[in-house]
Image (tube, rainbow, N blue to C red):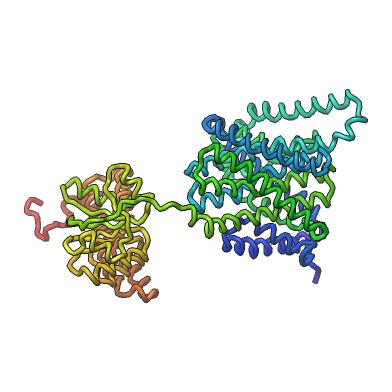
Amino acid sequence: MDHAPVWLTHTLIYLAAAVLAVPLTRALGLSAVLGYLAAGIVIGPAGFGLVTDVQAILHFAELGVVLMLFLIGLELEPRRLWTMRRPIFGWGSAQVLGCTALLFAAGWLAGASWTLALVAALGLSLSSTAIALQVMNERNILGTPAGQAGFSILLFQDVAAIPILALVPLLGAHDAAASIPVSQRLLEALQIVATIAAIILGGRLLLRPVFRWIARSRTTEIFTAAALLLVVLSASLMLSVGLSMALGAFLAGVLLADSEYRRELETDLEPFKGLLLGLFFIAVGMSIDFAALRAAPGLVAALVIGLLAIKGALIWTLGGALRLARPDRTVFTLLLAQGGEFAFVVFQAATGARVIDAPTSSLLVGSVAISMLLGPLLLAAMDRWLMPRWSQPRRLPEISEPQDAPVIIAGFGRYGQIVARLLAAQGVASTLLDHDADMVEAARAFGSKVFYGDARRLDLLRIAGADKARVLVVAVDDEAQCLAIVDTAQAHFPHLQLVVRARDVTHWNKLRDRGVRHVQRELFESSLRSGMTVLQVLGMDEAEVAQQAGRFRTHNLALFEQMYPHYKDRARLIAVARQGREQFEQQMAQERADAERARLDPAAAPDPTGETDIRA
């Protein structure tokens, strides 16, 4: 039997390494980028040596970076850029230029050549967009001042990476340029300008008509192929004149940012970008020269500490200028102080252009990777040790005197608010409780008298008037908290009528196990109303829609009662659900057929009262 070709073996290794490493790092709360890097380290020369030809895969994997920059260009609509121009170009330029200047000065004073110091400073000034955005999403801080400032700076860094990548080859050609005639250098400059102009003007005039013509073929794979062709063509044009491929892809993306094909292009290219970018990070992990790192551990430690200290000091100062609170300012600093994935691209390009040598590139790449690993770990340490010391006790409105309203509402989120407003409109007083401090403060700002507290606490329910109240509405979002509140109320206030919000069928069944009769599934009625709207839009009479929806509601609730005794027996539960649904659909189909026959032959219509209509 013949051996498998090399490309197939390598593909198997790359995919297996990514599938194993990335979920592990995500489970640890770290970025997928670190998973790809770890996978590359394990399978590369420094690990098990499963792949040794790193440069060959790096050249192919650079397409991932090219596609990423094309998609970044697609996101930069002129109107969006204009709306965010001040934070992006103000704070963003201050961060990049300030960090570059400080890092350049540190490198130059340490004895590095000015070209090495400049390339290192430019690469190290960039932060990890992938890690920062992931952390901001996890912490739900994108909408906060710190999140908005961080997003603006990251967006500027993505844009700034383009001229940085375009500058690197020019630095590499600096020494050789002295021996080149002025006329030849002028010709090369004109070629660069002409190529950029051709991409911009040609894109403006040709791209939309071409994509419109391709879209008319209604062949999805050809549209995707055309998008890939555009990216590769623009990248190749830039490469032919000695500039970065990413610059061409970025320009092509910007030209299509406000076109009608933007969303479709993003959807088509996103899977290619993700896979190729992951492959690029794997290749970067394989290319890290651990021998160089082990040879100079002190230098690596100095690079990492210096990077975090210099960038952190400047970004902390920017946070002060933005008037961020100390906890937000710390998160803002740690998110942006680490190195970023674009640094790998910059140092790889610099090595190819012979601006820096391979050992120096390995030191810089290794330092960036370590800083990216330390960033999330420092954030976790901050949450554990610093945040409890910094958090100030919030003066929240607590229940100090017993309440005597007939209704208590536990949970003042989007569900509880509607219940409370309906009761208030009918003159029914209610005591409002919520355990989310931010929600309590926001509700108070809008004039709602909400008390802070956890309704699972027996003492809090007593002060809230549970001894005298008639109804307890449990509107909390968390299922476990909801069931705990129900258990406490049933054990100590058996006279209370419980009206409970259920998240799903499983939650509904658990409430029924506790004997709760008034249970409302949170999305059932709104989904039913949406279905009624669809039927009306399709032309069905409003009265008929209301009648059929009422019958569906009655059937659905009855079916739930039939399923409830069997919900712990999955096979029996599925059988009951299928039987009930099929019977209802058959009944409705029969009624539609009877109605159609009655429309065609009124004399054949069944008498709804069971009696014969004498007028027939």
Vertical side of 455 occupied by 256: above or below? above
The x, y position of residue 36, in whole percent, is 67, 58
Q: Nearer the viewer, residue 552 or 31?
A: 31
Residue 467 as seen in the image, left or right of residue 117: left
Residue 212 as seen in the image, left or right of residue 7: left
The x, y position of residue 275, in whole percent, is 65, 53
Vertical side of 89 occupied by 145: above or below? below
Q: Nearer the viewer, residue 26 or 566?
A: 26
> Outermost residue, left direction?
614
Residue 351 as seen in the image, left or right of residue 26: right
Quarter occupied by residue 604? bottom left
Quarter occupied by residue 382? bottom right
Vertical side of 221 occupied by 508: above or below? below
The x, y position of residue 524, in whole percent, is 31, 56
Q: Nearer the viewer, residue 13 or 611?
A: 13
- The reply to whether residue 117 is in sight is yes
- The reply to whether residue 270 is in sight is no
Residue 49 as seen in the image, left or right of residue 278: right
Quarter occupied by residue 315? top right
The x, y position of residue 142, in whole percent, is 50, 45
The quarter of the picture where the N terminus appears is bottom right
